[in-house]
Image (tube, grey):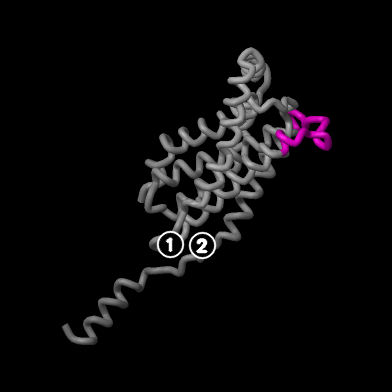
Amino acid sequence: MNDASIDELIDGLAGDLEPVRPRRIARASLWVGAGWLAAAALLLWLFGMRRDMAAMPAMSMLSFWLVAAVAIAAIWSALRMGLPGVGRDHGGWRWAALAALALPLSALFVGLGDGHRAVETARGGTELPCLPMALLAGLGVGGALFAWLRGGAPTSPARAGWVIGIASGASGATIAALHCPVDDIVHIALWHGGAVLLAALAGRLALPPLLRW
């Protein structure tokens, strides 16, 4: 094949191609942030914000920021999964998740020390909309991340499903914490942390088939 034929072949293959808009994490971050804020505004408008935000106990404040750190780390990992590249490290969210394990471990020690109180606190969670509220509130972040990764076709759909679920559940749990008036660590670990776990499982089971090439 001579040079002219090669040039004609290349021109034929590239003739119908159109430039693709570059994928920018900054743009995707704005969509994720908008989803987080929109869900928070809607859910807090419906359910209201707790009245004692300024006097929130240290344990509740610490748990809020731990869960927020998990959400931010998972969001960042998911955003990076939507970019082309080989050998990228998407495991930063694991360190935040390990730190957040302090919540269920603390709840476990509290339960061992006062089992009756722990049981009563756990039962009280059924009277509050904390878990379903957290799951619903996370849909804004989860939807934005799904749209981003759907366009990016991640190389590991299973891992992407996990990360989207964790980001969705953790972001929703931070919104629920702004409404929930209960500061007991057992309640926070069971009902707020449970939302993160359920969202992660849902993401792993439901999203991978939708994220495949």
Asked whether 126 falls inside the magenta stretch, the response is no
Q: Residue 84 carries which label?
A: 1
Range covered by the magenta-colored residues: 45-61
Crowd class of label 1 (few under 14; some 14 to 19; many from 20; radius 10 Å): few
Residue 14 appears in view: yes
137 vs 93, nearest the viewer: 93
Q: Could you tell me which residue is drawn at 60 percent across and 41 percent down?
A: 140
149 vs 185, nearest the viewer: 185
Q: Could you tell me which residue is drawn at 57 percent across and 25 percent down?
A: 108
Q: Could you tell me which residue is drawn at 68 percent across and 21 percent down?
A: 128
Disc 1 secondary structure class: loop
* Residue that badge 2 annotates: 23
What's the CA distance linking mark 1 and mark 2?
A: 9 Å
How far from the left and from the top, in percent, is residue 78?
50, 50
Total numbered labels placed on residues in the image: 2
81 vs 146, nearest the viewer: 81
State the residue lying farthest toward the left.
1
How far from the left and from the top, in percent, is residue 58?
75, 36
